[in-house]
Every structure is written in structure tokens, then in C-alpha cells.
Image (cartoon, helix red, strand yellow):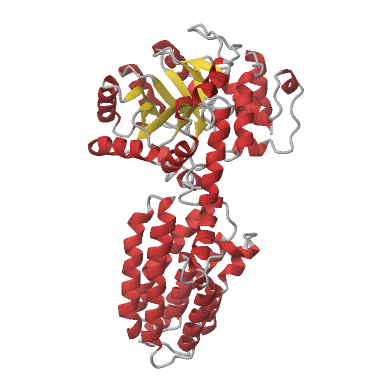
């Protein structure tokens, strides 16, 4: 036990921050112009969700499922796995998330009158504007983490969209992997001494508080 | 094309000195003799932890090749990797393929898996490096150490491995390491030793001398932290007497002057640092009192 306590997060880091951030540059270059088109497509998805369009669950579920599939196949398998041998164990779970989103999103009931509507919209907006976070951290635009390609903003986008729907078991099930991934990613960012970890931590805490608030509200109504 | 044999000659023979089996603190040389085999090896090797885990990134792969080019130009020697280091083995294979300097290489890698998978991992490691045999194969962090050592000694007898060793890092599992050092005829042991991490001085380094086991030192700069803490600090006056132009060189000299140490394996992404590291082994060495002053000064920063 004492030996395990002597480890720090940095001891588990297999790669340099430079190698990690360049993964996004290589992916963005390989998929150009998707890094520009995808945020626009996701913005439309976010708008029809916010407006609680009748078929938002189907349409947005399809788009977000494809995003998770791209994250699994392109980022994890084609790029990240080359420098992190734990990724092949994570990738099947990301594929599972894509399937769950495809199957369960249509059953979500989006509403414009959610108690924490602005908070949820804020998380969605942050996920779409995530390249600005990288710029603020001093990384070049070429290394941007784009929602739909990179896992962190895709997870944030998913959580934000879930927060726009009425609380059901589907929301809990669909939020497990994004929250777990963001915690894993936050640990990686801590190990790399990247200050943007606070963005993830704040978003995770906000989402969890939002869920708890909804749970308490539902219990009171009963 | 550069002639490999000429490189080895320029790198190793020009710097080789005759060392007695029992080295003293003041021994100054760029090469050391491996206690078990008697072979000469450059005292500064090259680690690959994190620095060579660059995946398929063409820019970072090219940079790694340049680091290797500088390393071989400076005489080559031990390059150490592990299956645990992500794509580092593949990066080395790419570099060796590009440079073709294999004759100046002392290849060192590790087994890091369960006993049942050791042979398969050894085969993968050879494929990744694109070589047929290794100068040194070690058991990484003592994982399934007894089973792997049995396999490695068999491979050594068969000529697939030149030397056999075990590794630890971060000063962990020293009791277990000492036990293995006493029970097995190891050629090398790898451990962490630097100006601030000196636990190995108590038992392991003296035991290595007693048992005729070569010592490979990892984390000489605590993954760069020790160099970072010297940023902006003036070099002590005695650095010029030792021909040292940086704190990193002083820290390497501290390690190299322990009589048990055979090879130090600093990792870097900069060819200039390779040259600087190699230079540290070629210039004057501190005596026992001066090396203590190096440790004290770094500790104070």
C-alpha cells in the first residue's frame, strides 16, 4: 500500500504534452474540413434540441452517435492508441456509448422549461467553443479539440444535451461514460500540468449538481 | 553514407581508457567495463521513457531520428526501452532503419508482462526494434521476475541475449531487488540514482560491486525536474574546473563518479542535450568531496 501511495499521477503519464496535443493537429489535418464543418452541424443539432423540436431525439441522437463513433474509430484507434496502451481497453466502451446514444436518445424528452436550462445551454456552448479553451491555454488553433472529433468536447456536448432533457433513467445511463471519460481526461491533464483541467472539473461538478438538483426536485414533487 | 565501423572506432575507441575492476571515485572516462563480460560500453546511454513515445507523428519521429543520429555520432552505446513505453520501441526501429548505425548500438529492452506471455513479448520487441538479438534484456520492475529470468538465462545461453538484468525505478522495491541480486547471476541491475535520490548508496550499489553486477542508472534528472529547479541558478565556481557548462553535466558527473555505476541513461528530445550528456562523461570528474558539494548545491535550489 505504501508503495502505491508513493506514486503521483505524473508517474502514470506515458507521453509528453507535446505528443498528446499533436495528436489533435494530425487528426484535424487528416480530416480537414470536418473540424470546421462539424461544429456547424452540431450547432444546428444544439438549436433543434434547445427548441425542443419534435424529432430532436432522433436527429440529434443520430448525429451525436456518429460523433462518438468518429471519436472511437479516428481519435482513439487511429491516433491515441499509438501512444497510450490503455486506449484499446477504452475504445469498446466508446463504441458502446455510440450505440447507446443511437438507441436511447430518441426516447429523451427535451423541454424548453428545464430548471437549469441556461446551465445546460452553457455546457453545450462551451463544447462547441472548445477550441477557444485551447487557444487560451496557449496552444495553436491547429491543435484544437473539436466537438465530434475530440473526446472531451464531445463528452461535454453529450452532457449538455442530456441536461436539456427531462430526467429519466436514460439520462443516467447515457451520462456514465462521458462523466467517466472526463474524469480520466482530467487526471491526464493534471499529470501534464495543464491548467485547462479546471474547465473539465467545473463542467463535471456543474452537471452532477444539475442532476442532483433535478433528482431532488422530482422527489419533492412526489 | 557514413561507415558504421568508423563511427564505433571514433566514438568508443577514442574515448576508451583502461579501468581496473575496482574503480575509484576519481576515475574519469567516457566508457566503462561491464563487470560480468568485460566489454567496454559508453558510460552515457540513452533512455526512451516518454521522449520516444511519439506514435506515428512524422515530425516527432524525425526529431527522434535526429536524437539517435547525435547519439551515434557521439559514440553510441546503450539505448534502453520497454514494452511499457508506448511506441518507443517502434520509434527506435524506425530510427535504426533510417540511420543504419546498429553496430554502435548496445540494445537494451525489457520484459513487462506475465510469465506466460514473456516469450511472445520478447518476439514482439525484436520485431519492433527490427533486430534479431539484444545486448541486454531485463525484467521490468521485477514483474514475474523468477519465471522471466529463467527464460532470459536460457535465451542468453542460446545466444539471443548478450546480458540479463532486472530493473526498478523511483527508488521502489529495493528489498526485493536486493534479494534478486543475491540469488541470480545478473549482468545488470537498473535503478534510480541521482543527486537527491540516494537510497541505492546504502546497500544496492555496494552489493552490485560485491556481486560484479553492472549498474544502469535511470531518472538521473528525475524526468527533468532536477534540471528545471536549476533554471536561472548560477553554476558553482568549481563547474569550470570540471569542464561542465550546465547543472545537468554536474548532476551526471555526480552519478558517474560512483564506482558501482556502469551506464547512465538520460532521456531527451534534443540532439544538443545528447552532446551535452556525452560531454559530461569526457571531461574531468569530481572527487568525493566535490560530488557531495554538487548534491548539496542542487538540494539547496
Q: Quadrant of the C terminus of chain B?
A: top right
Q: Is residue A176 visible?
A: yes
Decide if residue B68 is on the left or right side of residue B84. right
B289 in relation to A97, above or below: above
Residue B22: x %, y % from top left:
50, 7
Q: Nearer the viewer, residue A216 or B216?
A: B216
Residue B10: x %, y % from top left:
57, 20
Residue found 51% across the figure and 59% down from its top? A26
Q: Nearer the viewer, residue A197 or B137?
A: B137
Residue B66, quarter of picture: top right
B87 in relation to A125, above or below: above
Q: Nearer the viewer, residue A150 or A37?
A: A37
B3 in relation to A178, above or below: above
Residue found 31% across the figure and 73% down from its top? A99
Residue B50: x %, y % from top left:
49, 43
Q: Nearer the viewer, residue B172 or A20?
A: A20
Decide if residue B153 is on the left or right side of residue A187. left
Residue B293, quarter of picture: top right
Residue farthest toward the left in the current orientation of the protein = B116
Residue B172: x %, y % from top left:
43, 32
Residue farthest toward the bottom in the current orientation of the protein = A54
Q: Is residue B221 visible?
A: no
Residue B139, quarter of picture: top left
Residue found 42% across the figure and 72% down from its top? A67
Amino acid at each position: 500500500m505504501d508503495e502505491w501511495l508513493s506514486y503521483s499521477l505524473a508517474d502514470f503519464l506515458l507521453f509528453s504534452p507535446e505528443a498528446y496535443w499533436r495528436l489533435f493537429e494530425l487528426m484535424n489535418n487528416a480530416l480537414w474540413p470536418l473540424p470546421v464543418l462539424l461544429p456547424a452541424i452540431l450547432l444546428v443539432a444544439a438549436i433543434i434540441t434547445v427548441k425542443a423540436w419534435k424529432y430532436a431525439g432522433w436527429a440529434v441522437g443520430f448525429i451525436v452517435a456518429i460523433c462518438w463513433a468518429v471519436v472511437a474509430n479516428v481519435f482513439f484507434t487511429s491516433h491515441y492508441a499509438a501512444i497510450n496502451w490503455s486506449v484499446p481497453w477504452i475504445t469498446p466502451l466508446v463504441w458502446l456509448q455510440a450505440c447507446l446514444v443511437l438507441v436511447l436518445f430518441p426516447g429523451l424528452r427535451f423541454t424548453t422549461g428545464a430548471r437549469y436550462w441556461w446551465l445546460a445551454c452553457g455546457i453545450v456552448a462551451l463544447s462547441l467553443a472548445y477550441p477557444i479553451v485551447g487557444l487560451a491555454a496557449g496552444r495553436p488553433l491547429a491543435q484544437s479539440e473539436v466537438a465530434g472529433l475530440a473526446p472531451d468536447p464531445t463528452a461535454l456536448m453529450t452532457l449538455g444535451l442530456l441536461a436539456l432533457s427531462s430526467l429519466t433513467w436514460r439520462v443516467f445511463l447515457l451520462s456514465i461514460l462521458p462523466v467517466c471519460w472526463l474524469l480520466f481526461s482530467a487526471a491526464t491533464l493534471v499529470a501534464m500540468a495543464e491548467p485547462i483541467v479546471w474547465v473539465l472539473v467545473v463542467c463535471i461538478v456543474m452537471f452532477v449538481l444539475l442532476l442532483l438538483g433535478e433528482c431532488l426536485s422530482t422527489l419533492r414533487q412526489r | 553514407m557514413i561507415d558504421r565501423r568508423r563511427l564505433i572506432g571514433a566514438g568508443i575507441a577514442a574515448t576508451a581508457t583502461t579501468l581496473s575492476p575496482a574503480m575509484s571515485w576519481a576515475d574519469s572516462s567516457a566508457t566503462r567495463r561491464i563487470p560480468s563480460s568485460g566489454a567496454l560500453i559508453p558510460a552515457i546511454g540513452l533512455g526512451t521513457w516518454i521522449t520516444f513515445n511519439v506514435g506515428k507523428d512524422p515530425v516527432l519521429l524525425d526529431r527522434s531520428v535526429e536524437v539517435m543520429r547525435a547519439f551515434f555520432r557521439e559514440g553510441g552505446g546503450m539505448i534502453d526501452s520497454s514494452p511499457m513505453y508506448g511506441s518507443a520501441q517502434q520509434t527506435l526501429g524506425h530510427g535504426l532503419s533510417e540511420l543504419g548505425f546498429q553496430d554502435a548500438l548496445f540494445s537494451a529492452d525489457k520484459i513487462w508482462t506475465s510469465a506466460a506471455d514473456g516469450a511472445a513479448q520478447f518476439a514482439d520487441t525484436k520485431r519492433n526494434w527490427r533486430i534479431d538479438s539484444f545486448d541486454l534484456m531485463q525484467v521490468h520492475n521485477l514483474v514475474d521476475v523468477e519465471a522471466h529470468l529463467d527464460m532470459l538465462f536460457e535465451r542468453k545461453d542460446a545466444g539471443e541475449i548478450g546480458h540479463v538484468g532486472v530493473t526498478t525505478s523511483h527508488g521502489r522495491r529495493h528489498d526485493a531487488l536486493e534479494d534478486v541480486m543475491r540469488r541470480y547471476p545478473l549482468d545488470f541491475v537498473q535503478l534510480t540514482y541521482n543527486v537527491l535520490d540516494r537510497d541505492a548508496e546504502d546497500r544496492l550499489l555496494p552489493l552490485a560491486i560485491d556481486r560484479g553486477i553492472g549498474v544502469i542508472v535511470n531518472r538521473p534528472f528525475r524526468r527533468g525536474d532536477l534540471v528545471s529547479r536549476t533554471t536561472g541558478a548560477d553554476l558553482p565556481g568549481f563547474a569550470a574546473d570540471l569542464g561542465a557548462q550546465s547543472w545537468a553535466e554536474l548532476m551526471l558527473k555526480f552519478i558517474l563518479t560512483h564506482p558501482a555505476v556502469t551506464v547512465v541513461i538520460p532521456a531527451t528530445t534534443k540532439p544538443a542535450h545528447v552532446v551535452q550528456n556525452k560531454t559530461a562523461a569526457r571531461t574531468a570528474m569530481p572527487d568525493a568531496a566535490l560530488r557531495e558539494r554538487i548534491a548539496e548545491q542542487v538540494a539547496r535550489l
